[in-house]
């Protein structure tokens, strides 16, 4: 590291995205400091649904098993979701957000546990990596940057003591009210739904007993005609006692003037015994930073984008930011990245979030609003049942949520006019800009078990002149490249190509049977 710098990267915000980014960097030999105001993790059960793709991150970070062992609902109890009409105990329900429908396209299975449990696993893993300094009990209070690096001032949370850190880059992972974003002068675009929301945490063994009628379900989405498409949402914290609930409330609602117990009971469909443990409020809105980078300052997670907690997209999107940014920062700091690689973080991740917000979360609200306005069992029962049955058969949301980087400036072979998006299709064919689907190699290992820390070139028809040319190009550019050569005609048919160049984040950079290896690799590292 150059003289005068305390760390390669200073990360402001030590939630799951900030600590996840530090792990990604640390495993690549990049030093970081994580500045986090809370010395102890806040025990609020948010961010529970972790997708298969997110669990791949934990696999590569070396703590997948630890995360699964930290779940608060026993293994085998089921982590599925249900949508109910009117109340939680109504006669109309169907499976919702069944991520098992796409399990074959990912290496790891999905998981569910409270964010605080996940954060504990990440903190423990980060503490094992020498390249990471975890600085708890501090707020970031000042940022200055020049052509060489960034200076971050931090102040004791609730105190006056100060420290100054010098890094080559700084990354703000400090939430939707990000100090880092504001200090860097990064503006954001807001789409306000003008809804005040409440988050309740409560205990009720009676509710657990009532919901034994829905085995294997851990979260419940109630659609009620009175709430204009916004959800009344229940989630298990454990199996038997604790729950969280979020829903819209009047703009003037406070802890003292609103009957929250009655609200929960109305959503359940009958009176139940319950004890409130926590009441919090937040504003339902979408926010998207107008850029994810300003010089040597970058932002990720909720600092870059925020939205209603519908479908578990928030924490999953933030952790994908960490994976995407981590390898690009490491490549830049180690000197093998081209000048465009770090900018590709914004070019790939920002449009994916915009698509997530509009094509999925916002679309949920609009579709549910239209359904509730159009169909009512009290007015036309047969019509309602037909429409409800049709909704229950629709798995398009899970199947089409396939974040991809088609059209990215560092991907070769995208269709004309393509652009990064959260909307796509799952398949085994290897497609430029898409996540690689797992397959077994002839020796019995999964292809994910042989991927390198840098780029990986998989040649499915053995040694070829092209693989040798890729190796020569990588050596001349100091790009880490692992070459896997095997004779697998069945996989050529499945993947649709004999040669696949895979990025460090398991997305496909290029596929083909011919081409210019040096040009392809140069583009993949942002050098042209």
Image (cartoon, rainbow, N blue to C red):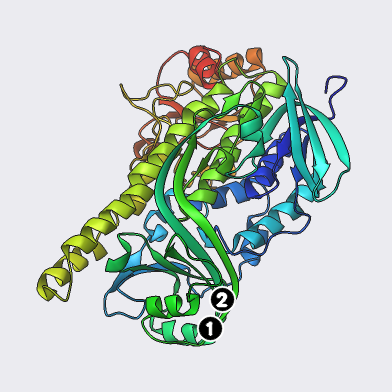
Q: How far is mark 2 from mark 1, CA to CA? A: 7 Å
Residue 29 higher or lower than 381, as above or below? above
The quadrant of the image that shows the N terminus is top right
Q: Residue at x 42, y 15 (%)?
A: 515
Lateral position of residue 440 relative to residue 295, left or right: left
Quadrant of res 249: bottom left
**Image coordinates for residue 280, horizontal then vertical, percent:** 57, 63
Q: How many marks?
A: 2
Lateral position of residue 166 relative to residue 241, left or right: right
Residue 62 seen by the camera: yes
Q: Residue at x 75, y 39 (%)?
A: 140
Residue 404 seen by the camera: no
Residue 230 higher or lower than 351, as above or below? below
Q: Residue at x 17, y 66 (%)?
A: 375
Say which residue label 1 marks. 274
For numbered disc 2, what is the local secondary structure? strand
Residue 148 higher or lower than 216, as above or below? above
Pointer 2 and pointer 1: residues touching (CB < 8 Å)? yes
Say which residue label 2 marks. 202
**Image coordinates for residue 301, horizontal then vertical, percent:** 57, 42
**Image coordinates for residue 186, horizontal then vertical, percent:** 57, 28
Query: Between 478 and 463, which is closer to the camera in this rendering?
Result: 478
Numbered badge on residue 9: none
For numbered disc 1, what is the local secondary structure? loop
How crowded pointer 1 is (Cα within 10 Å; few <14, some 14-19, many 20+) is rated as some
Quadrant of res 185: top right
Q: Earlier in the sequence, mark 2 or mark 1?
A: 2
């Amino acid at each position: 590291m150059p003289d005068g710098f305390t760390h390669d990267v200073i990360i402001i915000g030590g939630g799951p995205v900030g600590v996840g980014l530090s792990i990604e960097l640390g495993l690549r030999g990049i030093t970081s400091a994580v500045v986090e105001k809370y010395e102890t993790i806040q025990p609020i059960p948010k961010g529970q649904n972790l997708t298969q793709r997110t669990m791949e991150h934990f696999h590569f970070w070396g703590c997948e098993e630890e995360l699964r062992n930290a779940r608060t609902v026993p293994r085998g109890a089921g982590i599925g979701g249900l949508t109910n009409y009117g109340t939680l105990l109504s006669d109309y329900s169907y499976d919702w957000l069944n991520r098992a429908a796409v399990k074959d396209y990912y290496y790891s299975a999905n998981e569910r546990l409270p964010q605080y449990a996940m954060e504990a696993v990440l903190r423990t893993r980060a503490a094992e990596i020498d390249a990471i300094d975890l600085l708890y009990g501090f707020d970031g209070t000042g940022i200055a940057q020049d052509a060489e690096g960034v200076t971050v001032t931090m102040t004791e949370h609730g105190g006056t003591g100060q420290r100054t850190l010098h890094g080559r880059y700084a990354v703000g992972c400090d939430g939707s009210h990000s100090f880092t974003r504001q200090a860097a002068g990064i503006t954001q675009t807001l789409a306000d739904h003008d809804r005040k929301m409440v988050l309740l945490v409560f205990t009720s063994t009676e509710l657990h007993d009532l919901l034994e009628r829905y085995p294997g379900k851990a979260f419940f989405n109630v659609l009620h005609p009175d709430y204009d498409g916004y959800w009344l949402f229940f989630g298990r914290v454990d199996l038997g006692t604790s729950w969280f609930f979020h829903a819209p409330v009047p703009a003037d609602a406070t802890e003292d003037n609103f009957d929250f117990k009655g609200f929960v009971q109305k959503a359940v469909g009958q009176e139940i015994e319950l004890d409130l443990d926590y009441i919090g409020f937040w504003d339902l809105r979408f926010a998207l930073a107008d850029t994810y980078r300003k010089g040597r300052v970058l932002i990720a997670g909720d600092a870059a984008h925020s939205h209603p907690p519908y479908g578990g997209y928030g924490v999953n999107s933030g952790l994908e930011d960490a994976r995407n940014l981590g390898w690009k920062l490491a490549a830049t700091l180690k000197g093998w990245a081209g000048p465009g690689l770090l900018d590709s973080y914004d070019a790939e991740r920002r449009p994916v979030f915009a698509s997530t917000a509009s094509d999925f979360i916002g679309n949920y609200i609009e579709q549910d609003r239209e359904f509730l306005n159009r169909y009512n069992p009290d007015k036309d029962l047969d019509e309602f049942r037909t429409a409800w049955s049709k909704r229950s058969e629709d798995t398009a949301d899970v199947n089409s949520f396939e974040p991809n980087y088609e059209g990215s400036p560092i991907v070769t072979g995208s269709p004309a006019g393509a652009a990064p998006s959260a909307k796509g299709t799952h398949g085994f064919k290897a497609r430029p800009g898409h996540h690689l689907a797992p397959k077994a190699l002839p020796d019995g290992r999964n292809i994910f078990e042989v991927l390198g820390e840098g780029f990986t070139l998989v040649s499915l028809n053995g040694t070829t002149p092209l693989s040798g040319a890729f190796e020569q190009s990588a050596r001349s550019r100091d790009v880490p490249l692992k070459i896997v050569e095997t004779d697998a005609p069945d996989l050529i048919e499945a993947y649709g190509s004999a040669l696949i160049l895979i990025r460090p984040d398991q997305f496909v950079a290029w596929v083909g049977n011919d081409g210019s290896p040096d040009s392809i690799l140069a583009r993949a590292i942002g050098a042209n």
